Amino acid sequence: MKRTTAAIMASMITGASLLRARRHASTGAVGVVGTRLQTWIPPAPRSALTRLVAAMWASPVTLAGLLAGAGSATRPRFVDGIVLFAPARGITGLLIRRRGFTAAGLGHVVIALEEPSASLLAHELAHVRQAERLGPFMAPAYLALLAVHGYRHHPMERAARLAAERHATRR
Ligand SMILES: [Zn+2]
């Protein structure tokens, strides 16, 4: 437990320092990684074993999500292999609304202000898949890319938007 907290703290500190180096590396290695990431929608783990490994690997982020969910004044439920808190109220709901978002994904946890639409869920599930691959590196990677690209052009957000679009056209 202590180690998990330390990992989250380390992620936040790394993220914060990277945030300070804002718009420093829009070209070069970070730029190349960004271009690759904008279509990065990893497939869901198929077997029970890979699902378990993915859940464990993403667990530090999931834990942060559960803590945030605990402040959403909503009972959690299982949807599509994730823990969904919706409609989020309380301090967490307020924070999400204040930031102008409709939902937040943290590991295997999704917190949404309202009952998520199918396309919003597809968007958030793309982040779940990303978190399954990056595990404890999800937060520092996300924050580093946020510092460089901003939210709208964030490559992992582009990938999630693409996932939502694909979901919409599939129906
Ligand atoms: Zn997103």
Image (cartoon, grey):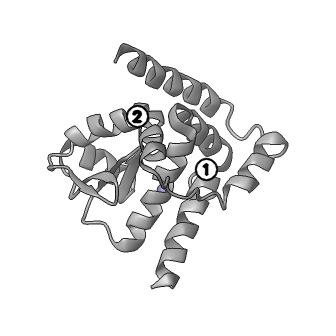
**Of 98 and 110, the residue lying toward us:** 110
**Of 58 and 9, the residue lying toward us:** 58
- Name the secondary structure under disc 2: helix
Callout 2 amino acid: Ser
Q: Is mark 2 within 8 Å of ligand 1?
A: no
Residue 39, image x and y in percent?
Answer: 66, 62
Q: Residue furthest top?
A: 2
Residue 146, by quadrant, is top right
Image quadrant for the C terminus? bottom left
- Name the secondary structure under disc 1: loop
Going by the image, does 82 lie left or right of 14? left
Residue 100, image x and y in percent?
Answer: 39, 56
In the figure, 155 relative to 20: above or below? Answer: below
In the figure, 65 relative to 82: above or below? Answer: above
Give the residue displayed 64% in from the left and 43% down from the top: 145
Q: Which residue is mark 1?
A: 150
Residue 143, image x and y in percent?
Answer: 57, 38
Give the residue displayed 43% in from the left and 58% down from the top: 124
Q: Which residue is mark 2?
A: 59
Image quadrant for the N terminus? top left
Going by the image, does 97 lie left or right of 11? left
Residue 35, by quadrant, is bottom right
Q: Mark 1 vs mark 2: which is more N-terminal?
A: 2
Residue 86, by quadrant, is bottom left
**Of 106 and 78, the residue lying toward us:** 78
Q: Is residue 154 visible?
A: no
Residue 142, image x and y in percent?
Answer: 57, 42
In the figure, 153 relative to 59: above or below? Answer: below
